[in-house]
Amino acid sequence: MKKIIIVSILIITGCTSPYSKFYVDKTGGVDITKSTINTGDVEVRHGANVDSDIRSMLENNYGLIGFSSFNASNVSDDGAISKAKEVHASVLILYSQYSGTKSGYTPLTLPNTTTSSTTLNGNIYNQRSGNTSYSGVSNTTYNGTNTTYIPYSITNYDYVASYWVKTKPRALGVIPKELAPEIHKKLGSNKGLLVDLVVKDSPAFYADIFTGDMLMKIGDDVIYDEASLSKSVSKNAGKEVDVLLIRDDKEIHKLIKLRSLPQ
């Protein structure tokens, strides 16, 4: 399972929820309604650790159908809930982590109009009437601007939302992982897959298959990779088969009846 990676952005604009804008689909275009159980309700959870929550969800037979990740300030849960309903998710897990505060000053420029008044007094000589006094006020208007710097502080968070659906019961119930090259070398074989997770309430769970076991054969089918495992499980669904494991350098055989595949 790949880790969810934070996609950082500086500013979110417009009416589109960032949970929709930065949604990443993990279904590969598959119609999930045919292989999942969905009541139509969305259960909202607030998670603490993405990696441990992913493992817990997979162990409880949930499948990840998508996620959203971004960096922003003060985003409500409403957009995530709307997106969960849109993609038919049954569980929504939300995460937010403080990522920093940006502070500074932004200029605000406003018009600034001033008026200057000058008082005028004096005498004017006229040949007919002699000296004539005068008095008055002269007004002059000046148009300008005044800039004020306003402080601001923006608190940002890393937001992650993961969207899950309850999948129908699995035929075997293991989630595999490729063996490391050094393990293949130690085995002296290119066969085998590592059991990375065991799904609860599955045939593998009740047969006491554990995380860390190496799955080598199902019936007569040698397991080399996920494709060969999937093919063998599909072929033997509903049947009782011998499963060969290696645990602590010892071969172990388990007689397991696989579940029939969901219709």
Image (cartoon, rainbow, N blue to C red):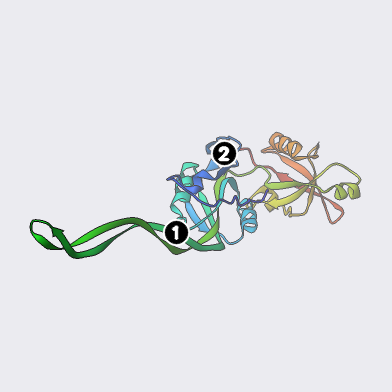
Can I make out residue 22 in this image?
A: yes
Can I make out residue 39 in this image?
A: no
Image quarter hosting the C terminus: top right
245 lies left or right of 201: right
Image coordinates for residue 84, horizontal then vertical, percent: 49, 47
| Residue at image location 16% in from the left, 60% down from the top | 124
**Dot 2: few (<14), some (14–19), or many (≥20) neighbours within 10 Å?**
some
User: Which residue is labeled 1 in the image?
Assistant: 107
Q: Is residue 249 above or below residue 105?
A: above
Q: Which mark is residue 216?
A: none
In the picture, residue 136 is in which quadrant?
bottom left
- Of pointers 1 and 2, the one earlier in the residue sequence: 2
Name the foreground residue: 21 vs 9.
Answer: 9
**Dot 1: few (<14), some (14–19), or many (≥20) neighbours within 10 Å?**
few
Image coordinates for residue 167, horizontal then vertical, percent: 58, 44
| Residue at image location 65% in from the left, 56% down from the top | 51
| Residue at image location 70% in from the left, 43% down from the top | 257
User: Which residue is labeled 2 in the image?
Assistant: 35
Task: State the separation of the CA atoms marked 1 and 2.
Answer: 57 Å
Image coordinates for residue 20, horizontal then vertical, percent: 50, 44
17 lies left or right of 217: left
Name the foreground residue: 105 vs 10.
Answer: 105
186 lies left or right of 236: right
Q: Spot the residue most to the front.
A: 127
Element at label 2? loop
Element at label 1? strand
Image coordinates for residue 182, horizontal then vertical, percent: 87, 50
**What kind of residue is marked 2?**
Ser
In the picture, residue 172 is in which quadrant?
top right
User: Nearer the observer, disc 1 or disc 2?
Assistant: 1
Name the foreground residue: 18 vs 253.
Answer: 18
